[in-house]
Every structure is written in C-alpha cells, then in structure tokens.
Amino acid sequence: MTEKAAPPPAARTVLQQCLHARLQVKPPDEQSEAEWVEIDRGMVIYVCFFKGATDDILPKMVSALLAQRLCESDSGRFVSVSELPGSLLIVPQATLGGKAKGKAMQYHGNVGKEDGLRLYGGFVSLCKKELQAAGGKSGTVKHGTYGNRQVLKLDTNGPYTHLMEF
C-alpha cells in the first residue's frame, strides 16, 4: 500500500522566546532617524507564506502558535506567551521559503507580494485579537513591515527556537 504524500505547507514559522527584542522597521534617511519597534519578555514569530496559502489557515496558525508552551515563567515552568504574560514581535521572513539551487537561494515557492501582504496583515490582526482575548494578562503585539529589509536585535536566555509548518 502506498502512502499519500503530505501536501506542501501553506506557511512556515519560526518561534524564538526572548527577554527583549528590537526590530528596525524604517531605516534612517536624510530627514529622519531609524524607526524601531520593541518588546520585552515574550516571543518572536518569524512567518513566511507559500503559494496556495489562503486566509483559512490564519486562525489555525494563530491558535497553535499562541498556545505553544515555549516561554519560561519566573518559576522555571514553560508556559504560552499569553500565560506569561508576554508580548509578541512578528517578523515577516520570506527567506524561510528559500530553497538552495547550486550556490544560490531561490524563493519561487513563496506567495506573491500582494497576497503575502494581505496574509501577513491578517495574521498580525488575529494575533492582536487573540492576545487581547486572553484577559489582559499578555503584553503587546509589535510587528515588522512586510517586504522590507529589517534589522533585528534579540536577547534570549537560550537558543530555544522552534520551526512550525501549517
């Protein structure tokens, strides 16, 4: 009997617990300084959407990601970011969709820019809604800008990083 191959993922995420994270969302120019968003204790979520991804995947993603017990509490027990309480920093990360071809990376499997921007915006909105619904225990949701190169500074208390696909 042959097994059916699993369908390709619609999205890939990487989760990283953090003590503090700071993301540059606008580089400096002649008229202004760089703009940053930052969080204290919580979780950084890097997200990439693939061709074929639809809005239907967003609730499942948000529910699963926010429920993961990856954040270390003061007692040393691992809890979800909403139980901590903690904040989220969401970073669009198209490079998670890269595949090596020779000595270069290719991103042909990633969703198009317009759909990616829409999916990313919906993902951020749902994360905000879910953390608010957690009863005010959690912190804030900050996010990067889709389609831009960004600078990340991250302080963590261990290389506690996880990959999740949807």
Image (cartoon, rainbow, N blue to C red):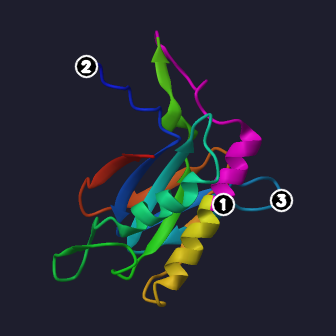
Quadrant of the drawing holding the N terminus: top left
110 is within the stretch colored magenta: yes
Give the mark nearer the N terminus: 2 vs 1: 2
Task: Give the residue at x 28% y 64%.
Answer: 70
Mark in front: 3 vs 1: 1
In percent of width and height, residue 120 lies at 64, 54
How far is the residue under mark 3 from the one under mark 2?
66 Å
Q: Is residue 42 above or below residue 9?
A: below
Q: Secondary structure at mark 2?
A: loop
Q: CA distance from mark 3 to mark 1?
A: 31 Å
Q: What residue sits 32% from the left and 50% below the top?
A: 162
**Amino acid tagged 1:** Gly
CB contact under 8 Å: marks 3 and 1? no
- Residue at the spot of label 1: 122
Of 137 and 134, nearer the camera is 134
Name the spot of residue 43 as percent of width and height, x first.
40, 65
Residue segment shown in magenta: 102-122
Q: Earlier along the polypeptide chain: callout 3 or callout 1?
A: 3
Going by the numbered disc 3, the residue's amino acid type is Gln
Circle 3 residue: 31
Q: Which amino acid type is marked by label 2? A: Met
Position in image of residue 93 (x %, y %)? 54, 44
SS state under label 3: loop
* Res. 12 mark: none
Q: Which mark is residue 1?
A: 2
Task: Tell which residue pokes out farthest to the front in this image.
Answer: 1
